[in-house]
Image (cartoon, rainbow, N blue to C red):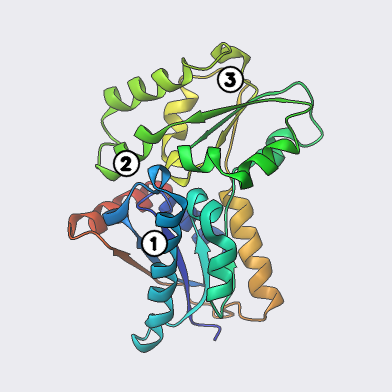
Amino acid sequence: MEEKYIGVFDSGLGGLSVLSELMKILPNENFLYLGDSKNAPYGEKTRKEVTERCFSIVDFFKNQKCKNACVKAVVVACNTATSAAIKEMRERADFPIIGIEPALKPACYEKTKQNVIVMATPFTLKEKKFERLMSNYSEKNNIIKLPCPKLVEIIEDGNLDNVELVRKTLSDYLNSIEIEIDEIDSIVLGCTHFIFYRKYIENIISDKTEIIDGNKGTALHLRDVLIEKNIMNKSDKEGSVKIYNTSDDSSLVDLSWELLKKLI
């Protein structure tokens, strides 16, 4: 059990940012990453469509039992998928499933009168799960929802290194909000794709603005679950990583490795 794989999945390539954090905190674990680029982006699909994709992926991880890549836990490295179907996925699986959500708590906890921008997919921002999360902090802080679907497309299309395109897209989004950029206290990256834009965003915003994501918290939570269930890999060997993608475009696996190397 200890040496089994931890499954990690996302609507496409964004979840590689979560995988990189998991590898740092759990270096001896074996990981199997699945990017569902064939069906990306999730952020503009219906709840039913996203849920059906999540079920298919959970079944994929279950079926790895007969392919020498048995899965002992799964990380949903996608805010949209977590919002849509985390409860239903857990009911469907016989292994722990860890979700992710926009990191509003560290942005707002014990703070008041903060201007907090939440950059995420349209789906995540309109879901009741996010509304409940937002209601915990919106009374004392000004939380602004900023849907950024084009940022997902740029990464999925392999255009992350197109500096002009990325800067213009980010500037257009950030200049569309109701406050000045230098008045932003925190930016919450509520989509795992957006971690790849951190350096670009830092060049646009004020030095006082904090950029926050939930990746480390998710990795630490997974570590706690593995310890609690006594299934952590106790080997001294460095863990392995396998990457799959649902797209017929085989170059996406190569692109996945390139993106992962940017973060580890």
Disc 1 or disc 3, which is closer to the eye?
Answer: 1
Mark sitting earlier along the chain (1/3): 1
The residue labelled by disc 2 is: 155
How far across and down, in percent of the image, does residue 52 sit? 41, 63
How far across and down, in percent of the image, does residue 8 sit? 45, 64
Count neighbours of disc 3 (C-alpha within 10 A) and say few if under 14, some if 14 to 19, many if 20 or more: few
How far across and down, in percent of the image, does residue 140 sit? 79, 26
Which residue is drawn at the image coordinates 77% and 37% (left, top)? Answer: 109
Please say if 76 is above or below 105.
below
Which residue is drawn at the image coordinates 34% and 49% (left, top)? Answer: 259
Amino acid type at image mark 1? Arg
**Residue nearest the viewer, comparing 252 with 145:** 145
Amino acid type at image mark 3? Asp
Q: Is any atom of residue 53 visible in this view? A: yes
Under circle 1, the secondary element is helix
Under circle 3, the secondary element is loop
Horizontally, residue 221 falls left or right of residue 55, namely: right
Label of residue 207 in the image: 3
Which residue is drawn at the image coordinates 64% and 52% (left, top)? Answer: 217
Image marks 3 and 2: residues in contact by CB distance under 8 Å: no
Please say if 154 is above or below 47.
above
Q: CA distance from mark 1 to mark 3?
A: 40 Å
Label of residue 53 in the image: 1
Q: CA distance from mark 3 to mark 2?
A: 26 Å
Disc 1 or disc 2, which is closer to the eye?
Answer: 1
Amino acid type at image mark 2? Ile
Please say if 172 is above or below 59.
above
**Residue nearest the viewer, comparing 1 with 83:** 83
Which residue is drawn at the image coordinates 54% and 86% (left, top)? Answer: 1
